[in-house]
Amino acid sequence: MYNNQTVSTFVILGFHNIIQYQKFTFILFLLLYIFIIAGNTIIILVIYFDSHLHIPMYIFISILSVVEISIVTTVYPTLFALFLNGKVYISFNCCFLQMYAFDAFLVTENFLLTVMSYDRYVAICFALRYHTIMTSKTSKILICLCWLLGFLSPLAMIIMVYRLPFCGPNEIDHIFCDSSPLLTLACTNSNLDVTMDLSVSSFTIILNSLFIGIIYINILSTILKMRSSEERKKAFSICMSHLIMALVFYGSVAFMYIQLQASYSPEYDLATAIHQSILTPLLSPLIYSFRNKEIKNFIKKQFSSKTIIRKTNYAQRLGRNI
């Protein structure tokens, strides 16, 4: 049954119902892409150059920015081609490579958010022992585990879909190669495969979201027991950015869960993909830059120091001319 492979190229249709606005949407998504890359790159550079931020909490944020850049770099080239050409032709193997890369980076982000919640838990509930628990070695091990689990978890599903027969049609009603719409093109009854795909995809995310929920229940319990309002305010500021980011990311789980309970819907799948590949990477630099005092202070310090240097150089040149 698995030897009926006749499809060598897939056609990604994308937003075929808004073809008249393709120039506007291309410019819009190009600006979004530039903002996402620039915003996350700034966060990475700030944490790299400021030695005061070389602690696990900020190292995790910088790795999260790397993951966000990787996700949009996997998806956006296809988006740009869709807006320029109306449709994208992609080879069979490249389609599965894109699907694997997107799933791997997404699962990596899932595990990374879980690790970050544990880091906040230790920082608030075991503040005096934080530096002995979250050592540099421990944080490096946790980061490596996030990448390892992220790239190993989707393999079984990718292999299962890759072995299915595809003999036509070959049009993917999506914005990139993803497992759910691809399964509907298989030359076999794929209802069970779609359900399995959605179940496996959502299992690790739901499991990690439950873990994060339990973590934050303990964090909230600890914060409420604090005596001074200043301590409570400081504790909330430590975990608020991560909590907002987790809520944004796991909002896509709601889409996946609703989709799993009903039959497969391209609209729900497209909405989930947009949420994961556009909304989350877009909000990440906003959340971690505007809500983080240390990152904002470093950026302000760099701009102010450069302004002083420019004014000093100008004054020196003016003095020489006089």
Image (cartoon, grey):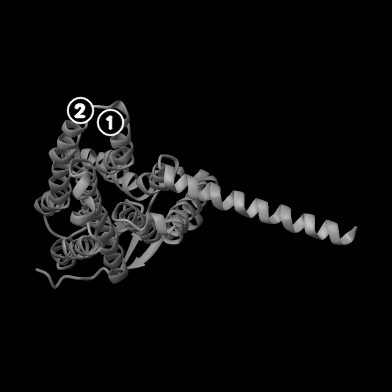
User: Is 93 drawn above or below residue 243 in the view shown?
Assistant: below
What count of labels does the image hold?
Answer: 2
Q: Nearer the viewer, residue 113 or 203?
A: 113
User: Is 150 drawn above or below residue 262 in the view shown?
Assistant: below
User: Which mark is first along the chain, 1 or 2?
Assistant: 2
Mark 1: which secondary structure? helix
The residue at the point 20 percent across, 64 percent down is 141
Quadrant, the N terminus = bottom left
Three-letter amino acid code of the residue under disc 1 = Arg
Q: CA distance from mark 2 to mark 1?
A: 7 Å
The residue positioned farthest toward the bottom in the image shown: 3
Quadrant, the C terminus = bottom right
Identify residue for label 1.
Answer: 232
Q: In the drawing, what numbered circle is on residue 224?
A: 2
Three-letter amino acid code of the residue under disc 2 = Leu
On screen, residue 231 versus residue 299, left or right, reads left
**Residue 96 picture location, percent across and down:** 26, 66
The residue at the point 61 percent across, 53 percent down is 305
The residue at the point 28 percent across, 71 percent down is 93
Image quadrant assignment for residue 101 = bottom left
Q: Are marks 2 and 1 in contact (CB under 8 Å)?
A: yes
